[in-house]
Amino acid sequence: MSMPGLVPMIRNVGRFREIVNTLMKYGLADWLKSVPGDWVKQYLSTVDGEKIADLSYPVRVRLALTELGTTFIKLGQILSTRQDLVGPDFCEELTKLQSQAPADDYETVCRIIEEELGEPPDQLFGRFEREPLGSASIGQVHRAILVDGSEVVVKVRHEGIEQRIQHDLEIMDILAQLAEKHSSLLRHYRPVETAADFRRILLDELNYSSELRNMIRFRGNFEEREEVRFPKPYKEYSTARVLTMEEFRGTSVADAQSVADQYDLTEIARQGANVYLDMVYRDGFFHADPHPGNLMILPDGTIGILDCGMVGKIDEELRDQVEDMLMAIVEKDGRWLTSIVVDLGQVPTDLDRDLLQRDIVDFVEEYVGLELDDFDLTGALEDLMRIIRMHHILLPPRVSLMVKVMVMLEGTGRLLQTDFSLLALIAPYRYEILRRRLSPYRLWRNSKRAYREWSQLFEILPRDTRELLRSMKRGKFEVHLDHRRLDKIVNRMAWGILTAALFVGSSQILSMKVLPTLWGVSVPGFLGCSYSLYLAWRLFRAIRKSGDLG
């Protein structure tokens, strides 16, 4: 192990041992099922006393992540958005992960607020409730009233949580490096790259200043929309460890049926879905956790959206590709959808595009003839993710997150309206998408960008061409080729040449009956031919095992 990885492991050796032991404990259950007697199994149980060997693999993963605490729970929650990586069974199980944690005592909360804001809460606020409303893995929430009478909630980060998360992230980086180096199965999923993405997301969520900026941006994007509200943040009462925002009081969407006689839930479902579609298609900046607990029906019938810590961002190019993917599903165009998937994802070098297209065309044909109101978008997206995963295609994390949001949004909408169809609301966006792409402003902007890029090309092309010609004239022109797996290919080529040479030479010795002979056959020639045939067989078997022969 390299020195940069060795230092964090030594510094966190106790936690490292705990993580490895927990992973090994939950990984042993498969082979323990074949061990007779319960006396062994009793030593491998969950914290609740359940026998690990009796649990399914996704459940064991969820329990292991839960047992390992905050960082790994967050990892599981993020992996629950990567159906292209882990599949629907894992996604469904990982969505059950709850970020609960014991609350810090009131004295600790007061000290943190005073360190961050300069004064204790009883001097900053008109009232500050000692008992928290709730406590999650990163922080806890207290009700308060500002001196001007505004009702707010104050999120306070748990003491020492950033150090614990940093240590876990260091260990996770080491485990990712080991997995990528020693596991051919896990290497396909790019654990080092996944760990780096997770580090960025978690550290961003750990910083309450990011959530404050997200709320400000959402409020600006929807300031003219009356059907949706985001909490007002109070910057003067907020830092990286403390976040003060407007308190919403209303009915959670999870309990919407209890107020069905007071509101038009069908209209609320439609308006809420359109808000999210505007986030994705208009803004490229969307709230990434639309589960019922984060959506609220306010007393005036508007929708309140809570917890802006987790957001998704897509640039214009990626948004165009995502729009094309959904439009291809709406229009049931399998060939178009295949091209989009290949362009959008990271495809393996041995991808069988014809087989992929056949699978996607078959998938699309299942939905031919269905009216939009009868179209199950959640089922369609899950089927598409299954095909993508089956062909070992990796989608960009931002796209996987957006697909997850669509699935969650449709499920939340059906709590309000049993026959809710998100696709029926997406379909009219085709015209909005076309209008935006053909708008004079966008055409002018794309023209300016193309002009700038061509100008740069024409500026550097003469200079680079001149340098190339000078190098050729001086005899210093070199071409460097980088070929994947070249070492293995060269080794096999050398082995084949040596085997062929040994066979040819031994055949000549055999035909010349070089001494010593046995029953008229040259012993050196016979042994050389036999050994060359053995080497040829081993080479053939190695090539066939690698799949290079098809």
Image (cartoon, helix red, strand yellow):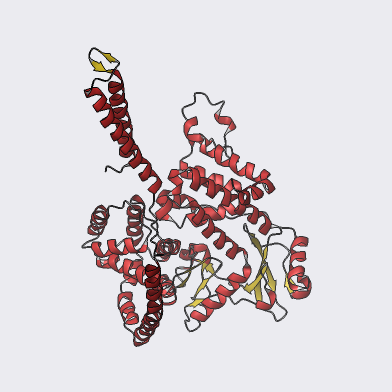
Q: Which of 296/459 is in front? A: 459
Query: Does residue 416 appear to the left or right of 175 in the view shown?
Result: left
Q: How many marks?
A: 0
Can residue 261 be seen in the rendering of this structure? yes
- In the rendering, at what x and y percent does residue 266 appear? 39, 71
Q: Which of 94/493 is in front? A: 493
Q: Quadrant of residue 322?
A: bottom left
Against 276, is 451 above or below?
A: below
Against 533, is 152 above or below?
A: below
The residue positioned 75% from the left and 75% from the top of the image is 124
Q: Which of 193/119 is in front? A: 193
The residue positioned 60% from the left and 39% from the top of the image is 21
Can residue 70 be seen in the rendering of this structure? no
> Which quadrant is home to the N terminus?
top right
Against 454, is 345 above or below?
A: above
Against 489, is 320 above or below?
A: below
The residue positioned 41% from the left and 55% from the top of the image is 83
> Which quadrant is home to the C terminus?
top left
Query: Does residue 504 appear to the left or right of 34 in the view shown?
Result: left
Q: Which of 538/202 is in front? A: 538
- In the rendering, at what x and y percent does residue 464 appear? 40, 74
Q: Quadrant of residue 526?
A: top left
- In the rendering, at what x and y percent does residue 96 appear? 51, 52
Query: Does residue 251 appear to the left or right of 543 in the view shown?
Result: right
Query: Does residue 199 appear to the left or right of 83 in the view shown?
Result: right
Q: Residue furthest top?
A: 519
- In the rendering, at what x and y percent does residue 489 appear? 35, 45
Q: Quadrant of residue 323?
A: bottom left
